[in-house]
């Protein structure tokens, strides 16, 4: 892959990782019971709050490190799709699902392209990226 695209993928991976890591961390710091309550209030089983928070927290960290980038990004894609369908679409684009759509697109890019520059994943492949 062209070096420019690999560097762009690195930035997408790091920004997406930081964003989800902080969102997951906040869910635990603010009290996961608040997120459980929110999930219940919109008709989603509260137990899924733990799953989402862990995917965001651990997944974000894994993206920053570049470990399991495609798999983690696929999980984050599913989380964002679920958030958009269950909660955000009803709020409209502006102030609703615009950020979720951007995060969903970033995750999809990483599912398709991966990101091996400065990643642990690179240690497990024979491809040369740099």
Image (cartoon, helix red, strand yellow):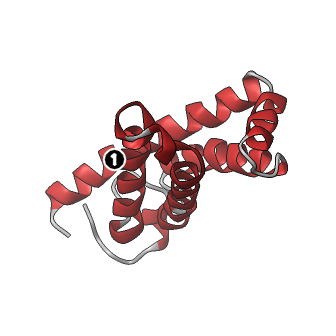
Q: Position of residue 4 (x, y in %)?
A: 15, 55
Q: Residue at x 54, y 55 (%)?
A: 85
Q: Is residue 11 left or right of residue 107?
A: left
Q: Residue at x 81, y 52 (%)?
A: 45
Quadrant of the image containing the N terminus: bottom left
Q: Is residue 99 left or right of residue 4?
A: right
Kindly identify which residue carries mark 1: 12
| Nearest the eye: 57 or 104 | 104
Q: Position of residue 100 (x, y in %)?
A: 44, 44
Q: Is residue 83 above or below residue 36?
A: below
State whether residue 15 appears in this view.
Answer: no
Q: Position of residue 15 (x, y in %)?
A: 39, 39
Q: Position of residue 36 (x, y in %)?
A: 80, 38
> Looking at this rendering, what residue extends furthest in the top direction?
30
Q: Residue at x 54, y 67 (%)?
A: 71
Question: Which corner quadrant of the image does residue 68 belong to?
Answer: bottom right
Q: Is residue 27 left or right of residue 102?
A: right
Q: Is residue 57 above or below residue 119?
A: above
């Amino acid at each position: 892959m062209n070096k420019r695209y690999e560097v762009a993928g690195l930035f997408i991976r790091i920004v997406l990782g930081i964003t989800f890591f902080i969102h997951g961390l906040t869910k635990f710091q603010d009290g996961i019971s608040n997120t459980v309550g929110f999930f219940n209030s919109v008709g989603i089983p509260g137990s899924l709050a733990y799953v989402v928070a862990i995917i965001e927290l651990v997944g974000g960290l894994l993206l920053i490190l570049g470990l399991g980038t495609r798999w983690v990004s696929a999980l984050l894609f599913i989380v964002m799709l679920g958030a958009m369908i269950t909660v955000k679409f009803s709020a409209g684009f502006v102030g609703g699902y615009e950020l979720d759509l951007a995060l969903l697109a970033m995750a999809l890019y990483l599912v398709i392209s991966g990101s091996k520059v400065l990643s642990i994943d690179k240690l497990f492949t024979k491809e040369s990226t740099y």
